[in-house]
Structure formats: structure tokens, C-alpha cells
Image (spheres, rainbow, N blue to C red):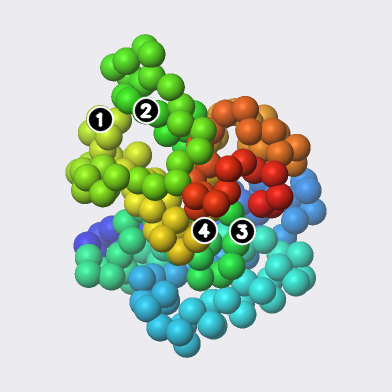
Amino acid sequence: MHNKQALASIGQPLLMESYREAFREYNIYVAQLLLVWRDFDSRKHTAFAQNTIDTLLAHNVLPIINENDTIATDEMIFGDNDRLGAYVAHYFGAKLLVILSDIDGYFDKNPHQHTDAKIIPIVHSIPQETLQESHSPHAGFATGGIVTKLLAADFLLGHKGMMFLSNGRKLDVLRDFLLHHNHRCGTLFCPAEIQNIEGIL
């Protein structure tokens, strides 16, 4: 644990320098906000973080939010950015959480094993047995990365929130979804009363 936390403290400024370089050509300033589980377990801590984010956005500064791995412990750790993103979206009032992954969306079956697997475009609820699968990142389609994404979506659905899952290598899909309200790929997790993207963004 100590070694991991020490490595995290070395890596965090390097990560932020990468973000600064990436956004510099767009004249966008970035700031770092490091959170742990207890920041969402206390109204006072959540309010402090909310005020920081609101102030940054009011000055056109983009907050880059990550888990504070340098002080997080096994008992107080998210462990994945999917669920951290869901908490940030809910507690800080985002309309939509977008998760970009290496998959095109949520499929009705394992696309690596079934050539007839189809993306489910809209999901209103997630079976609890699916959420109880192993979270190993190197396991099959129904475990690992996809499960943490489903856990994030389930949390937001339970709080009337929304999440869009899409492929990070196909940013045209995200552009069409967000800017043109054209849902041609990816999966939208949303409450049952919402049937399409029109009017939700």
C-alpha cells in the first residue's frame, strides 16, 4: 500500500502536465481535484468540493477529478473511475455522465463470443445478478470493466441520473449524441420515463 501511494504521488503531477499540454492549444486552463470516499460521506466535505468546482467553472477552468490515491485506504477507496464518476455526476449536479471505453456500448450478450451480439441502445434498469459478478479487470465480458460501468449506471439510475457509454476511439459517436442529438451507437442508461435523447440535454 505504501509503495502504491508513493507512486501515485509521483504520477499525479505527470498526469496533470499531460492534461495541461493537451488543453493548452484550446486556451483552456485545467485544475486538479483529488477526492476520496469520505468526501461524499459528509455534507460538509461535499459542499467544499462543490464550491471549488463551481468556482473553477465560473472562471472557465476545467476541473480534472481523480481519486486521491496517495491517502486512500482499502476501507475508503473507490478503486475505479467509473463509480467515482457516477458520484461526481450525482453529487455535483451533472446532467449526464459520459464513460468512454474500449467497447461500443452495452451488449445483450458477450460480443467476443457471439457474432450476433447487439448493442442495447437504451437501458432503464440493470438486473441485480449482473451487478454481483466479479470485478476482475481481466475477466470476461460480464465481469471486470463492464461491471464497474454497470455499477456506476445503476447508482445513477437509482438517483434519477443518466449515463452514456460509448467507445473512446469513436468520438464522432459522442459528438453526434451530445451536439446533434443523434443516438446512432452507444448505450444510454436513463430513467424509464425517458425514451430518447430529445430534450434531456
Q: From the viewer's perspective, is 25 left or right of 44?
A: right
Q: Where is residue 140 drawn, in percent x and y? A: 25, 30
Q: CA distance from mark 2 to mark 4?
A: 22 Å
The one of 29 and 75 positioned closer to us in this rendering: 75
Asked if residue 102 shows in the view, the reply is no
Most distant residue in the bottom direction:
44
Q: Label 3 is placed on what type of residue?
A: Lys
Asked if residue 22 shows in the view, the reply is yes
Q: Label 4 is placed on what type of residue?
A: Gly
Q: CA distance from mark 4 to mark 3?
A: 7 Å
The residue to which callout 3 is attached is 95
Q: Considering only order in the chain, which callout, 4 or 1, is on the residue closer to the N terminus?
A: 1
Q: Residue at x 61, y 80 (%)?
A: 51
Q: Label 1 is placed on what type of residue?
A: Gly
Crowding at mark 3 (Cα within 10 Å: few <14, some 14-19, many 20+): few
Question: Looking at the image, is 151 positioned above or below residue 57?
Answer: above
The residue to which callout 4 is attached is 161
Q: Label 2 is placed on what type of residue?
A: Asp
Crowding at mark 2 (Cα within 10 Å: few <14, some 14-19, many 20+): few
Q: From the viewer's perspective, is 78 left or right of 199?
A: left
Question: Looking at the image, is 122 positioned above or below residue 200?
Answer: above
